Image (cartoon, rainbow, N blue to C red):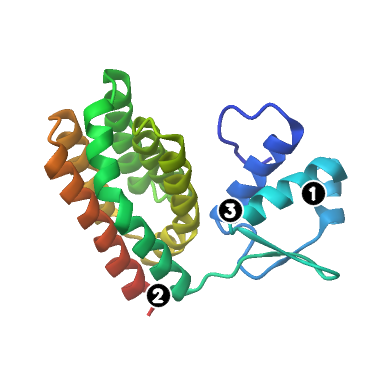
Amino acid sequence: MPKTEPGPTRESDRIEAELRHLILTLELEPGLAVSEAALMKQYGWGRTPLREAFQRLAEQALLQIIPHHGVVVTSLSVFDFIEVMDAMSLVIGPAAELACRQLSDEQLAELDALVEQGEKASGAGDFVNVAEVDYKFHRVLAEASSNRYLRDYLLHLHRVATRFNFAAWKRDRNVRPSLAEHRQLADLFRARDGAAAGKAMREHVENARLRLVGSIK
């Protein structure tokens, strides 16, 4: 079975998490028509919770529900990626400064651990795990903002960006620049340097944009 994020309790939550993993790691390829019957047979999922998961993943822009045709994995478009990064650039600096003031010692330790996990996964060529760790790193920071609206907005953008990141890392076999930026960010957050952390986070997003666009071209 696909990996899930910790926490979901309802069947529809578990299905949503498992489907998201399949989509974000491109096991369900962009543009693929998703067979409800095939998923139910393969994983033993119920129709009602599966359809609830479809609806939520459509709200996250990972699936498209086309009336009278079915469900399709949202295609990857460089234009979509640019829009996502533009949206992220508008809020990521202030969000990082806010998180810098509120990160707990436990969250700081988690950031350090995630940097190490990402470096280990990169060394092993495990880009699925790299993508998962990258998302977790940014999830810690989004949650540290202590603003549920900002948190949900950032996590939505990061989920969309994850597919692009994973595709580029898998193709280019090089995630070292992004991991080096994560280590720099973790150090700045531990130093409680909000202004520097905000600047570094904006640069991290812009560097990701340049790397991804260059890779897609």
Q: Could you tell me if the residues under marks 1 and 3 are in contact, i.e. CB atoms within 8 Å? A: no
Return the residue at label 1. 51
Percent from the top left, x then y, of residue 146? 38, 30
Q: What's under tag 3, amino acid-wise?
A: Gln
Q: CA distance from mark 3 to mark 2?
A: 23 Å
Return the residue at label 2. 216
Looking at the rendered structure, the secondary structure element under dot 3 is loop
Return the residue at label 3. 60
Quadrant of the image containing the N terminus: top right
Residue 92 circle label: none
Q: CA distance from mark 1 to mark 2?
A: 32 Å
Residue at point 12% right, 44% down? 196
Q: Is residue 137 visible?
A: yes
Q: CA distance from mark 1 to mark 3?
A: 14 Å
Eyeballing the image, is 26 above or below 115? below
- Which one is nearer the viewer's eye here, 55 or 50? 55
Q: Nearer the viewer, mark 3 or mark 2?
A: 3
Q: Residue 203: which quarter of the image?
A: bottom left
Q: What's under tag 1, amino acid-wise?
A: Arg
Percent from the top left, x then y, of residue 166? 45, 58
Percent from the top left, x then y, of residue 214? 31, 75
Looking at the rendered structure, the secondary structure element under dot 2 is helix
Residue at point 67% right, 43% down? 16
Q: What's under tag 2, amino acid-wise?
A: Ile
Quadrant of the image containing the C terminus: bottom left
